[in-house]
Image: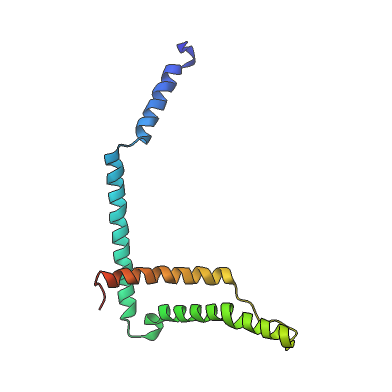
Amino acid sequence: MNSFGIGSVIDGVGRIADDLITTDNERLEIALREKELDTQILSKVHETNIAEAQHRTLFVAGWRPFIGWVSGLALVYTFLIQPIFLWINSIYNLTPTPPPQLNDDMLFNIVLAMLGIAGLRTYEKQKGLTK
């Protein structure tokens, strides 16, 4: 029966299983190391954000507010101005061409990214890390 090398296959599978299966303590250590790395990364991002916000030129310090305002205006256009214009145009037949439509998918990606950053800002304010 051992002529097919079944014993060596079983030993090999056992070694692989030992490498793959971790104890609860090992999982906890891995999770703690990942949390430490996440904290370090967030700390560096926070330092970068502070440095950008304190920069003397509006080009560097104002890019986040600019993106926020542009995204907000794009949302107002997409959900208020364009539908109202289309509705009025359908009633009075003012123009034969419809107004331009924005790329909603890209807009939502940008807005969600900005809201994620805003969520971190709220966390900073709650922890008293801002002025």
Residue farthest top in this picture: 1
Count the marks: how many? 0
Q: Identify the residue shown where x is 42% and y is 21%.
A: 10
Q: Position of residue 128 (x, y in %)?
A: 24, 72
**Up/down of 105 relative to 89, above or below:** above
Q: Position of residue 115 (x, y in %)?
A: 43, 70
Is 86 on the left or on the right of 34, as rendered? right
Residue farthest front in this picture: 91
Q: Position of residue 28 (x, y in %)?
A: 28, 45
The chosen color scheme is rainbow
Q: Identify the residue shown where x is 26% and y is 40%.
A: 25
**Up/down of 60 relative to 13, above or below:** below
Q: Identify the residue shown where x is 35% and y is 31%.
A: 18
Quadrant housing residue 127 = bottom left
Which is nearer the eye, 98 or 42? 98
**Up/down of 24 relative to 109, above or below:** above
Quadrant housing residue 42 = bottom left
Q: Position of residue 15 (x, y in %)?
A: 37, 28
Question: Where's the C terminus, which quadrant?
Answer: bottom left
Which is nearer the eye, 54 or 87? 87
Q: Identify the residue shown where x is 63% and y is 83%.
A: 84
Is 105 on the left or on the right of 125, as rendered? right
Which is nearer the eye, 76 or 16? 76
